Image: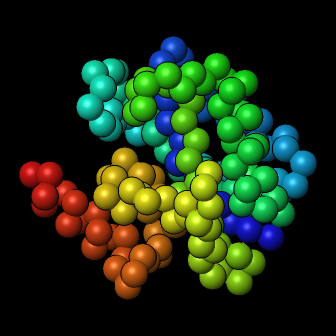
Amino acid sequence: MYTYYIGIGSNLGDREVYLAFAVSELTNTDGVHSVSHSSWIETPPWGPVEQGPFLNGILKVESTLTPLVMLDTILHIERLAGRQREIHWGPRTLDLDIVWIEDEFGHPVRVTEATLVVPHPYFWERQFVLEPLQEVYPTFTYEGVSIDSRLEALRIVEA
């Protein structure tokens, strides 16, 4: 059994409908035992492409699916939602990223594959990932630093 923390976002069309669609699709996937999520938060886009604001959150998914199978699953859900990968960091109907994985004992699962790197390479730098992650996993720590401390540091830098 794995616990996945999956970043979710949308900035095209009816953003809440796309997020709800992803939750529903994951909930109805064989091998997925539970799906819960943070509150949705509106955030500015990340990256150099001019685009509208995102609705973001974190999904907490309990599953027997292996990391690469989970990746295939979420990429399929993105495609079902009409996701187009034309512009890197561009606008999207649905964006799903595996941020963090733990095994059944609560130990981090690291993945380094051509198609998947976990922990997500940028998650510790992105307030729009850490704020909802803190909501669903308030005791989270990374490399000895609590999520509370990291968010405080990011807010100081942003100010």
Residue located 32% across and 33% down the image: 45
Q: Position of residue 47 (x, y in %)?
A: 30, 36
Kindly tell me whether residue 15 is visible in this rendering.
no
Place residue 87 in its image quadrant: top left
Residue located 54% across and 36% down the image: 95
Q: Position of residue 62 (x, y in %)?
A: 74, 61
Place residue 110 in its image quadrant: bottom right
In this rendering, the count of numbered labels is 0
Q: Is residue 123 above or below residue 110?
A: above
Viewer-nearest residue: 113 or 47: 113
152 lies left or right of 79 = left
Residue at the farthest front position: 114
116 lies left or right of 144 = right
Residue located 73% across and 56% down the image: 68
Residue located 13% across and 60% down the image: 156
Q: Position of residue 119 (x, y in %)?
A: 51, 65
Q: Position of residue 81 (x, y in %)?
A: 66, 23
Q: Quadrant of the N terminus?
A: bottom right
Q: Is residue 64 above or below residue 92?
A: below
Residue at the farthest left position: 159
Color style of the picture: rainbow
52 lies left or right of 21 = left
Kindly tell me whether residue 92 is visible in this rendering.
yes
